[in-house]
Image: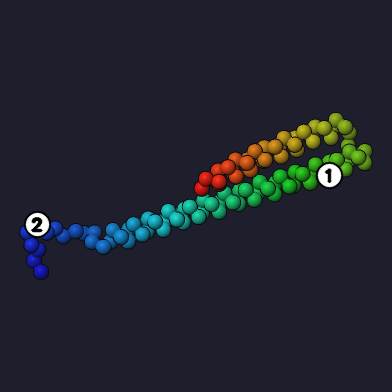
């Protein structure tokens, strides 16, 4: 069928819809993958915090039993508390960040 004057044949035709659909699927997949990664990081932070708190309990027991000096107890306790505070800060930041997504 010959083209009328003023008509142009587009090379894209309905293909632009497939391209847009493909881009949308890639965007959704990236969002899901990113959310899963953040969730895994959050869980790892929780697990690390819990392990540090258990270590603090073990350290306190060692002190109570006299198996560790007061100076060593204080040094190790400060390090654990500092690490827990850092993790809590990261958890708070993650929670604030996810509240707007």
What residue is rendered at 56% in x and 51% in y?
37
Tag 2 near tag 1, CB within 8 Å? no
Residue 18: horizontal and vertical position, in percent? 32, 61
Give the residue drawn at x 58%, y 42%: 96
Q: Which of the numbered marks, if any, corresponds to residue 6?
A: 2
**Label 1 sits on residue:** 58
Q: In terms of depth relative to the viewer, which is nearer, 92 or 39?
A: 92
Q: Nearer the viewer, mark 2 or mark 1?
A: 2
Could you say which disc has been placed on residue 90 in the image?
Answer: none
Q: Earlier in the sequence, mark 2 or mark 1?
A: 2
Q: Quadrant of residue 6?
A: bottom left
- CA gap between label 2 and label 1 equals 84 Å
Mark 1 residue crowding within 10 angstroms, few (<14) / some (14–19) / many (20+): few
Label 1 sits on a secondary structure element that is helix
Res 66 quadrant in image? top right
* Apparent side of residue 9 relative to residue 88 in the rendered image (left or right): left
The residue drawn where x is 32% and y is 58% is 19
Residue visible at 14% across and 58% down?
8
């Amino acid at each position: 069928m010959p083209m009328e004057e003023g008509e142009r044949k587009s090379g894209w035709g309905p293909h632009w819809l497939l391209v847009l659909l493909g881009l949308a699927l890639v965007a959704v997949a990236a969002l899901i993958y990113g959310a899963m990664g953040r969730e895994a990081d959050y869980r790892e932070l929780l697990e690390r915090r819990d392990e540090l708190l258990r270590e603090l309990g073990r350290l306190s027991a060692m002190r109570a039993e006299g198996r560790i000096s007061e100076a060593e107890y204080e040094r190790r306790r400060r390090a654990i508390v500092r690490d827990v505070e850092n993790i809590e800060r990261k958890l708070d930041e993650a929670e604030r960040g996810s509240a707007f997504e």
